[in-house]
Image (cartoon, rainbow, N blue to C red):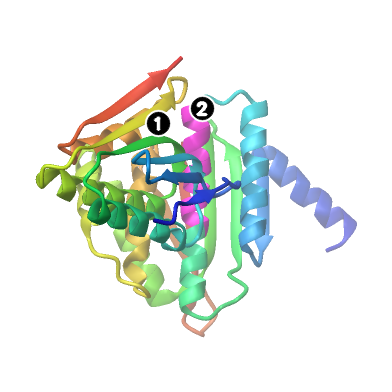
Amino acid sequence: MNDLNLPGTQSTPSIFTDARAGLLKMGGDSYPENSFELFGPVLEWVEAYLQQSSAPLRLELELLYLNTSSIKAVMEIFDLLEAAHAEGRDVSVEWYYDRRNERVGELAEEFKEDCTFPFAVIGRE
Amino acid sequence: MNASDLYALRERFNQDRTLLCFNGPTSRSLIEEIGKALKNYLEAEHAHPAEAMDVFSVYIEMIQNIRQYALQRDDAEAAATVVIARGDSGGYVVSVGNLVDAADGDRLVAMIERLAGLDKAALKAEYKTQLRKPRTPGSASGAGLGLIDIARRAREPLQASLSPQGEDGRAFFSLSVAI
């Protein structure tokens, strides 16, 4: 499987995958004009990983500001996890954020509301 | 513009406690640069991180709606007018406008007036419904989710206005959001 390793820019998050470890990491701001151009390969990677492997998948997120089209794309990633979880797969999300900015915590909590797989929103001091 | 007009313009900006303003064609990189300047100003003013994020987010959603609208109409300029100022009673006011077809403007104003009448819980329900709607490339309904997000961040009901421009069926649409 081809892993992704994209450095972050001002308007796009860093994206890192490790299929052998069953890990997807994303961090930073995300407000590109075309979010699906950015997240398309991530969606493909998640789909391929879930198909080709039966090992767990863990998402480690430190996303900050997401524009609404990024929010929609991230929701689609979580939908893939939700479907895998319904089939008994071991999937989870850990979303770390700085407690000084409660907006990020609120954003993560709103995603969590629609997910039944393990989803931890972890505030850091 | 002559020199004294510029002075009058400056006075007006100062009176309105303007932090940042822009008028003209936009590009992706310009939007990012203005966004970066905005973040720096807000940080220098020690705005609370959540408040700074709300101001930045409203700016991005509004300007990206405008650029999306222009893109659908093969309008490479995507001209916009942006003013970000301090509010009279604290906080910030983000105002953004662009030229639209009057009929599109009417629809936008109606949508915004409807959102302005909803409380936070109703806005959240509306947001979740809109988020679940399938993407329809090239449809003008794309402004929906962004506008709901803006309404959720606003601390006062949204204010929109439409100023007709001559007889070509165009109008200047503007939206003002208090954060």
Residue B54 is a magenta residue:
yes
- Residue bounds of the magenta highlight: B50-63
Residue at x 67% of width, y 50% of height: B33
**Image quadrant assignment for residue A92:** top left
Q: Is mark 2 on a helix, strand or loop?
A: helix
State the residue in front, B48 or A109.
A109
- Residue A121 lies, in percent from the top left, at 31, 27
- Label 2 close to label 1 by CB (< 8 Å): yes
State the residue in front, B90 or B75.
B75
State the residue in front, A103 or A9.
A9
- Residue B133 lies, in percent from the top left, at 22, 61
- Is residue B2 found left or right of A79 in the rendered image? right
For disc 1, the marked residue is A103
Q: How many marks?
A: 2
**Given the image, what chain letter belongs to the residue carrying mark 2?**
B
For disc 2, the marked residue is B49
Residue at x 52% of width, y 57% of height: B63
Magenta span dominant secondary structure? helix
- Is residue A67 found left or right of A22 in the rendered image? right
Q: Is mark 1 on a helix, strand or loop?
A: helix
Looking at the image, residue A58 lies above or below residue B134: above
Would you call the spot at circle 2 few (<14 residues within 10 Å), some (14-19), or many (20 or more)? some
Looking at the rendered structure, the kind of residue marked 2 is Pro
Residue A70 is a magenta residue:
no
- Residue B146 lies, in percent from the top left, at 38, 54
CA distance for labels 2 and 1: 8 Å
Labels 2 and 1 positioned on one and the same chain? no
Residue at the far top: name it.
A125
Residue at the far bottom: name it.
B168
Using the image, tell me which numbered label, if any, was put on residue B6: none
Looking at the image, residue B28 lies above or below residue A91: below
